[in-house]
């Protein structure tokens, strides 16, 4: 019997059945890694996300399909570009590097909240750790539908009437980023970044971000935006330092 050929065939079948793009890290892989404990010599990364070029003007949403939404926010506009004096909000910034794969990181007990308010997702972009609870709240007097479309996590689709308890969900695999939509209100969009570590941030109304508590080492710092794509830089960190790192996206040259 030709064992090498049989083994190769099984590997190919396994690849076809699971998909070649699945992450190499699974929740079971984490159990054998040491839990990371802060030493007091951790580093930080802070910076701003800016844009150059001609930023598209917001467009009015057509919410006529749901009169309740029209009443809640009659002047609703698109939020894919939120810019204040060339500073970009809602950019997802995160760290990646081999050093982080050596450890596992405690999952926060606190829930992350995604709210339906004025027929929009709030916040528009958020981050959480794999295994952390995501609380989805409907604060509107109308029915919503929450439908994430992940690549590496199970997909689900659930309706949420007003005045009901929050939905509680988790994602067990890393994924940057998971699109969320509402099948009943097609203008509602959000993005959720899921990482196995806590080293991520979302740029605020002035384009600022900060990531703290990083063990010293050599990393890549990545910034993602739904319209402008992704940029990354290599970033070495020494114990106790605060490193400044700024990014600029050229709107006229989308990534």
Image (cartoon, rainbow, N blue to C red):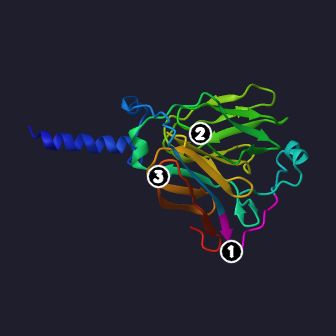
Front-lying residue, 193 or 63: 193
Q: Locate residue 62: give its quadrant.
A: bottom right
**Which residue is drawn at the image coordinates 48% and 34% (left, top)?**
105
Give residue 255's position: percent from left, percent from top: 56, 67
**Which residue is drawn at the image coordinates 89% and 51% (left, top)?**
74
Q: Nearer the viewer, mark 2 or mark 3?
A: 3
Q: Which residues are magenta?
A: 50-60
Nearer-N-terminus badge (1/2): 1
Considering the whole magenta stretch, tell me its main secondary structure. Answer: loop
Could you say which disc has been placed on residue 53 in the image? 1
- Mark 3 highlights which residue? 238
Residue 53, magenta (yes or no): yes
Quick one: label 1, few (<14), some, or many (20+) residues within 10 Å? few
Q: Secondary structure at mark 2?
A: strand
**Which residue is drawn at the image coordinates 33% and 44% (left, top)?**
15
Nearer-N-terminus badge (3/1): 1
Give residue 37's position: percent from left, percent from top: 48, 33
**Which residue is drawn at the image coordinates 87% and 42% (left, top)?**
68
Nearer-N-terminus badge (2/3): 2
Quick one: label 2, few (<14), some, or many (20+) residues within 10 Å? many
């Amino acid at each position: 019997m030709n064992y090498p050929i049989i083994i190769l065939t099984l590997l190919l079948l396994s690849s076809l059945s699971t998909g070649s793009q699945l992450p190499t890290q699974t929740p079971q892989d984490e159990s054998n890694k040491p839990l990371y404990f802060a030493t007091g010599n951790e580093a930080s990364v802070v910076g701003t996300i800016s844009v150059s070029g001609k930023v598209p003007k917001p467009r009015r949403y057509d919410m006529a399909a749901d009169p309740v939404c029209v009443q809640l926010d009659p002047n609703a506009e698109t939020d894919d570009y939120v810019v204040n004096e060339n500073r970009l909000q809602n950019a997802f910034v995160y760290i990646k590097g081999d050093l982080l794969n050596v450890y596992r990181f405690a999952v926060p007990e606190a829930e992350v909240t995604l709210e339906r308010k004025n027929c929009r997702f709030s916040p528009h972009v958020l981050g959480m750790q794999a295994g952390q609870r995501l609380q989805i709240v409907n604060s509107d007097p109308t029915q919503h539908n929450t439908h994430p479309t992940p690549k590496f996590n199970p997909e689900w689709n659930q309706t949420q009437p007003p005045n009901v308890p929050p939905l509680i969900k988790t994602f067990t695999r890393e994924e940057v980023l998971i699109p969320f939509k509402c099948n009943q209100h097609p203008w509602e969009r959000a993005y959720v970044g899921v990482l196995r570590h806590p080293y991520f941030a979302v740029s605020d109304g002035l384009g600022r971000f900060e990531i703290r508590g990083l063990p010293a080492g050599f990393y890549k710092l990545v910034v993602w935006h739904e319209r402008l794509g992704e940029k990354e830089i290599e970033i070495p960190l020494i114990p106790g330092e605060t490193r400044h790192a700024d990014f600029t996206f050229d709107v006229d040259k989308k990534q």
